[in-house]
Image (cartoon, rainbow, N blue to C red):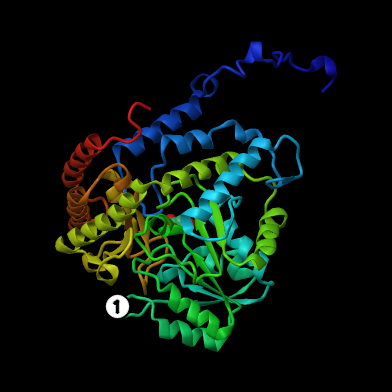
């Protein structure tokens, strides 16, 4: 195209474009509309996905702050960019608060996500091809703990432990036997769908027995540990990774914690420059805010309420005839086995969605169905507890879930419209009584 044929462009500049002044609504009505709809979805439906929560307005504000604009490669006091004064302030606050919250000596607050925090530990402590152990995905593990489709399973040599068939709990004797047979360099404890108390001390004994590093992926239960509602992995774990947006109720992100100074250089070097470039400083700011919130005494009450509510939900589900894997829960989450109802996780998730109960289909231990179909659903109480639901509300939610699932069992995948409509009305009533982001 010749210069003379170029279309006339409006001059770029604040006065003409509204660059500095336009709200999202004015600048981009389509994205704005989707954000409003998402807000309404969170306000009007009950969130039961065990890995989700409802962050405070302060966390959202920090995550949407001008730190979005800042490059701060490096670490506080040692950056590769100028102008990092305030980036240093927030990163130092986040580190100090994380250390205080989890009672450990060191923290790296830069991992952008759960996957990257785990990759960073692998990069710091393993060589490609090294053997490591993790909980099998089908027993409640995580993709990054050795799934064959994940980098952890492609570039390393994963060996899995599972749960016992009889009681669907981890068998520490089996963990020891597998470790002895395979001599892993690293053992991961922690998962995404295991609802019982983790025996950190037992895992450390196994790790010591075979000379392995013990890594705890605390993601799901970090908030419970921070609030004293689940035993802490310290001093047993050599390194702890955790996302910050699940029971911890912060922004979507990752965090690495450890005690031994000898791990500091390898871990920090692995996060930057090994794996990541500039940290997301707006998210680091939001992490600092979330950690401050979690240090408050109210957070202990929250963490204990999450567990009490999960127990009430599990009991209600069982009273209404559905089976909870392992017979109950000690934490924030549970798997519901739908096999006896001949309902798949996929159909149940869809029916519950129609009734405004948001869940996810999930494989159960020894599931014979594919991960896209599954025989179960996973439920969690962190988000509902944040909005103020207590035992009575979660008992009611257990009844509503059973009604919807029974509708699918009776009428097929399409469910029973009338049942789903009446459940939706009850959900609307509960949501109205416990508002989320009022006035937003
Ligand atoms: N996808 C998350 C979960 O739902 O548990 C874990 O990364």
In the rendered view of the protein, which quadrant contains the C terminus?
A: top left
At x 64% / y 36%, what residue is drawn?
A: 86
Relative to residue 285, is residue 211 depicted above or below? below
Tally the numbered discs: 1
**Image quadrant of residue 413?**
bottom left
Relative to residue 176, is residue 145 depicted above or below? above
Task: Decide if residue 151 is on the left or right side of residue 330.
Answer: right
In the rendered view of the protein, which quadrant contains the N terminus?
A: top right
- Looking at the image, can residue 196 be seen? yes
At x 53% / y 24%, what residue is drawn?
A: 28
What x and y, as percent, mark residue 353? Answer: 31, 46
| Farthest top residue in view | 15
Task: Decide if residue 84 is on the left or right side of residue 256.
Answer: right
- Disc 1 crowd rating (10 Å Cα; few below 14, some 14-19, many 20+) is few
**Image quadrant of residue 120?**
bottom right
Relative to residue 91, is residue 323 depicted above or below? below
Ligand 1 within 8 Å of disc 1? The answer is no
What x and y, as percent, mark residue 295? Answer: 43, 48
Q: Label 1, secondary structure: give it.
A: loop
Of residues 347 and 103, the one drawn nearer to the viewer in this rendering? 103
Q: Which residue is mark 1?
A: 167
Of residues 300 and 35, the one drawn nearer to the viewer in this rendering? 300
Figure quadrant, ligand 1: bottom left
Task: Decide if residue 161 is on the left or right side of residue 436.
Answer: right
- Looking at the image, can residue 48 be seen? no
What x and y, as percent, mark residue 195? Answer: 34, 66
At x 84% / y 20%, what residue is drawn?
A: 2
């Amino acid at each position: 195209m010749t210069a003379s044929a170029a279309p006339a462009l409006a001059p770029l500049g604040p006065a003409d474009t509204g660059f500095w002044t336009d709200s999202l609504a004015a600048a981009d009505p389509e994205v704005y509309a989707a954000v409003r709809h998402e807000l309404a979805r969170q306000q009007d439906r009950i969130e039961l996905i065990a890995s989700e929560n409802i962050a405070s307005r302060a966390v959202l504000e920090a995550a949407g702050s001008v730190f979005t604009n800042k490059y701060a490669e490096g670490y506080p006091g040692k950056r590769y960019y100028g102008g990092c004064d305030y980036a240093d302030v927030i990163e130092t606050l986040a580190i100090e608060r994380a250390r205080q919250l989890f009672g450990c000596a060191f923290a790296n607050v830069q991992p952008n996500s759960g996957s990257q925090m785990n990759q960073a530990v692998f990069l710091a402590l393993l060589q490609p091809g090294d053997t490591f152990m993790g909980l099998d995905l089908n027993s409640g593990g995580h993709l990054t703990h050795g799934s064959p489709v994940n980098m952890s399973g492609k570039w390393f040599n994963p060996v899995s432990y599972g749960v016992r068939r009889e009681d669907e709990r981890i068998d520490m004797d089996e963990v020891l036997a597998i470790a002895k047979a395979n001599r892993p360099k690293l053992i991961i404890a922690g998962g995404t769908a295991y609802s019982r108390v983790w025996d950190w001390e037992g895992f450390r004994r196994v790790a010591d027995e075979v000379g392995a590093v013990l890594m705890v992926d605390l993601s799901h239960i970090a908030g419970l540990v921070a609030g004293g509602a689940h035993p802490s992995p310290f001093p047993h774990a050599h390194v702890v990774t955790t996302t910050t947006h699940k029971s911890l109720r912060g922004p979507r992100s990752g965090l690495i914690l450890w005690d031994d100074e000898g791990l500091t250089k390898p871990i920090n070097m692995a996060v930057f420059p090994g794996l990541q470039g500039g940290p997301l400083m707006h998210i680091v700011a939001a992490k600092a805010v979330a950690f401050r919130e979690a240090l408050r005494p109210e957070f202990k009450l929250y963490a204990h309420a999450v567990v009490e509510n999960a127990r009430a939900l599990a009991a209600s589900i069982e009273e209404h005839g559905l089976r909870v894997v392992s017979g109950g829960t000690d934490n924030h989450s549970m798997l519901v086995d739908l096999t006896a109802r001949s309902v798949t996780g996929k159909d149940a998730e869809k029916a519950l969605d129609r009734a405004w109960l948001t869940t996810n289909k999930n494989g159960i231990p020894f599931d014979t169905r594919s991960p896209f179909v599954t025989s179960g659903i996973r439920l969690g109480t962190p988000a509902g507890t944040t909005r103020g639901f207590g035992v009575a509300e979660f008992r009611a939610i257990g009844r509503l879930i059973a009604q919807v699932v029974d509708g699918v069992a009776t009428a097929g995948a399409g469910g029973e419209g009338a049942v789903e409509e009446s459940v939706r009305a009850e959900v609307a009533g509960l949501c109205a009584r416990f508002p989320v982001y009022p006035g937003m």
